[in-house]
C-alpha cells in the first residue's frame, strides 16, 4: 500500500526530501507499494511488494545499508544488497 509518515523530521527520517516536521500524515513519494515498515528514532526501513528494501534517515553507523556514513538520507533509497553467503549451508 501507500506509505504515509508524520512527526519529527530530523535527518530526513520521514522520507519527504527534507528535515521538516509534519503534523499530519503525508504521502512518501518515490517508493513502490510498501508491505512492511519499521520506523526508528532517526531512520526508517521499508519492504516493497516486489521484495526490494528501502531505507532513509540518519546513517551515522551504516544502519541504512548503503555502505556509507551519511547525516541525512532525506528520501527513500533502495538498498542494493540482494543476497549474502556465509559459506557452505549458510546462504540467505
Image (cartoon, helix red, strand yellow):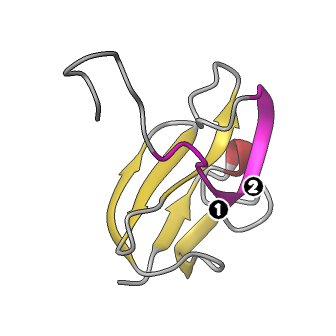
As helix, strand or loop, the secondary structure at mark 2 comes to strand
Image point (28%, 30%), residue name: 91
Q: Is residue 35 above or below residue 76?
A: below
Q: Main secondary structure of the magenta part?
A: strand
In the rendered image, residue 15, in percent from the top left (x then y), is placed at 64, 62
Q: Residues within 10 Å of mark 2 (few under 14, many from 20)?
A: many
Q: Is residue 44 left or right of residue 38?
A: right
CB atoms at circles 2 and 1 under 8 Å apart?
Answer: yes
In the rendered image, residue 58, in percent from the top left (x then y), is placed at 68, 36
In this rendered view, identify the residue nearer to me: 25 or 59: 59
Q: Residues within 10 Å of mark 1 (few under 14, many from 20)?
A: many
As helix, strand or loop, the secondary structure at mark 1 comes to loop
In the rendered image, residue 80, in percent from the top left (x then y), is placed at 61, 48
Counting residues from the start of the chain, the first of labels 2 and 1 encountered is 1
Instruction: Give the residue number, with chain letter if any, for mark 1.
Output: 15
In this rendered view, identify the residue nearer to me: 56 or 83: 83
Q: Which residues are magenta?
A: 68-82
Q: Residue furthest left?
A: 89
Q: Quadrant of the C terminus?
A: top left
Image point (64%, 24%), residue name: 62
Residue 10: say if magenta. no
Per the model, the C-alpha gap separating discs 2 and 1 is 5 Å
Q: Residue furthest front?
A: 88
Tell me the quarter of the picture where residue 81 sits: top right
Residue 81: say if magenta. yes
In this rendered view, identify the residue nearer to me: 40 or 89: 89
Image point (64%, 80%), residue name: 29
Instruction: Give the residue number, with chain letter if any, for mark 2.
Output: 74
Amino acid at each position: 500500500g501507500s506509505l504515509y509518515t508524520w512527526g519529527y523530521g530530523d535527518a530526513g527520517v520521514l522520507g519527504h526530501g527534507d528535515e521538516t516536521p509534519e503534523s499530519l500524515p503525508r504521502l512518501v513519494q518515490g517508493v513502490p507499494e510498501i508491505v512492511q515498515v519499521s520506523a526508528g528514532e532517526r531512520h526508517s526501513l521499508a519492504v516493497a511488494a516486489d521484495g526490494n528494501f528501502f531505507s532513509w534517515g540518519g546513517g551515522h553507523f551504516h544502519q541504512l545499508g548503503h555502505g556509507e556514513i551519511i547525516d541525512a538520507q532525506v528520501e527513500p533509497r533502495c538498498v542494493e544488497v540482494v543476497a549474502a553467503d556465509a559459506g557452505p549451508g549458510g546462504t540467505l
